[in-house]
Structures are given as structure tokens and as C-alpha cells.
Amino acid sequence: MLRTEGINAHLLEKFTPNPGARPLLPELSPKAQVALMCRILRREGWDDHIAGHITVRQPDGTVLTNPWELAWDELRASDIVTLDRHGKILDSDWNVTPALGLHLQLHELRPDANVVIHNHARWSGIWADLQQVPPVYDQSGAYCGVELPLYDDYAGTFEKQQTSLSAAEALGDAKWALLANHGSLVVGRDLRQAHLRVVTLEWRCRRAYEVKLAGGGRPLADEVVERLAIADANGFPFLWEAMARRELRNDPSVLE
């Protein structure tokens, strides 16, 4: 992953003219990046035991995903499974969840959705169960804008093709959604953008829940949130790398 991949290179050069004292990360294979993403997001609260799935479309049209049998915090690069565009396993003895249909359909419907992530997350899951959209109270919850669709036509899990197709079509061109009484869904053009969206969603949901418990507060005005949301399109420099280094310090075997 290049230093400027997914980042507004002009702004990066303007505000960070120095090259840095050392590389932010070692060279990472695509599978290592996916394994690290699973570890990173698990720490953010996207952690329902072995539930949840990440798919990352590759330039050749194949798709990388996590295996069904393993929890996100134990995944290694060698565990990541390669699929063809129809979901057929190409290179692994692991299995994948039949609920991946939603991901594969989103990849087909959305040229911009190279990364699709779904789980039953800790904080956004609360608002999904409340069937409410959380307000934005601070800068860290505003990085990806105000609009947050709530998909409330819950017809069960996504093993059935029509169920997953309905959800994929309902998402439209949205970057994320709450799935009522189910969980959360985030898409992105690359891992950096998808990561920023996940962590922003969880922060927004957590802070809104805490403010609600404290008796309520005054949310940011929509126009303020939209000014702060420049990070979503321009990228958030160095954030993904910092969280990846945290996981590498914790367990270097993730790269195996």
C-alpha cells in the first residue's frame, strides 16, 4: 500500500513535506492487509465472535475474504481466502459464510465498492436495535458526513439471495448503513477509506449513546458536520498505518 494511496496527494505534500524518519509499515501483501484490517476492526468493537465478514475486490476481479471458521482476532495472512466473483473458493481449505451474497452483489452493483464490511458491532449495533440514527456530537463523529441510512426491512440473515439483493439495492450509493435489529454495513473504495468509515461510525454511535445516557446534548449542525467530512473523500493520512502498527506490535504472527 503506497503512502499516498487513497489520499489527496496534493494536500499530503502541502502539509507533510518531510518524508518521515522511517517507513510507517513493512511491505504488506494484499492478504496481510485484510488480516490486519480484521484485527483492527475487532479492536474497534466489530466483534461478534465468528460473525462478520470483510471482502476486498482485487484489480483482477477476484475477492479476498476472511474464513468462516476463524475469529477476527486470530486471523493471519495465510488464512485469507481468495474467491472468484461468484464466490467460488480458489485457494484455501477454509470455508466462507453463505451470507457473503450481500458482499458479492454489492461488488457487482457498485464499481466504487471495492471493500464491503458487515458485522454486528458493539456501538452501532445499539442504534440499529433502537432503529434510530444517532446524532453527531463532535469532530471525530463527523469525518464521514451526516447521512446515515437505516435499512429497516429486516427479513432475516443474508444466506438467501433475494434477501441480500434487496439490502444491496436499498443501500443505493450510500457509504454505510444501519441494518435494523441486525448490525452495520460499510463500503469503501479501499481499506483506508473503509477503515475511516468504520471507526467514525463507531465513534459517532458510542458518543451519541453516552450523551443520551448523560441526559442529552446539542448535536452539531448538519452544515458543520459536512465541513468536517472532508476527511472521507480526501483520506485521513497515517491513521490506518498507525492502527496496523498497533496490531503488529501486539501479534507479529498476523503476517504469517
Image (cartoon, rainbow, N blue to C red):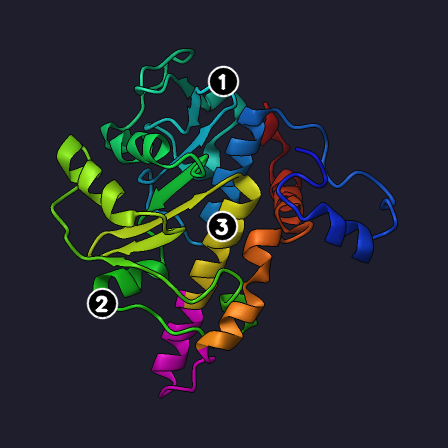
Label pair 2/3, CB-CB below 8 angstroms? no
Residue 43 shows which numbered tag?
Answer: 3
How crowded pointer 1 is (Cα within 10 Å; few <14, some 14-19, many 20+) is rated as: few
Q: Residue at x 42, y 67 (%)?
A: 146
Vertical relation: 136 (above or below) 184: below
Estimate the x, y position of residue 135 in percent, counting from the top left: 38, 74
Per the model, the C-alpha gap separating discs 2 and 1 is 40 Å
- In this rendering, would 240 be left or right of 218? right
Q: Which corner quadrant of the image does residue 241 belong to?
A: top right
Q: Is residue 102 magenta?
A: no
Locate the N terminus by quadrant: top right
Above or below — where is 194 with respect to 223?
above
Q: Which residues are magenta?
A: 205-221
Residue 163's x, y, as percent?
Answer: 15, 39
Q: Is residue 213 left or right of residue 31?
A: left
In the rendered image, residue 171, in percent from the top left (x then y), is placed at 29, 48
Q: Earlier in the sequence, mark 2 or mark 3?
A: 3
Residue 130's label in the rendered image is 2
The residue shown at (42%, 34%) is 111
At mark 2, the secondary structure is helix
What's the residue at 42%, 24% (across, down)? 63
Q: Is residue 215 left or right of residue 41?
A: left
The residue identified by callout 1 is: 60
Residue type highlighted by circle 1: Asp
Q: Amino acid at mark 3?
A: Arg
Give me the C-alpha separation between circle 2 and circle 3. Answer: 23 Å
Q: Which of disc 1 and disc 2 is earlier in sequence?
A: 1
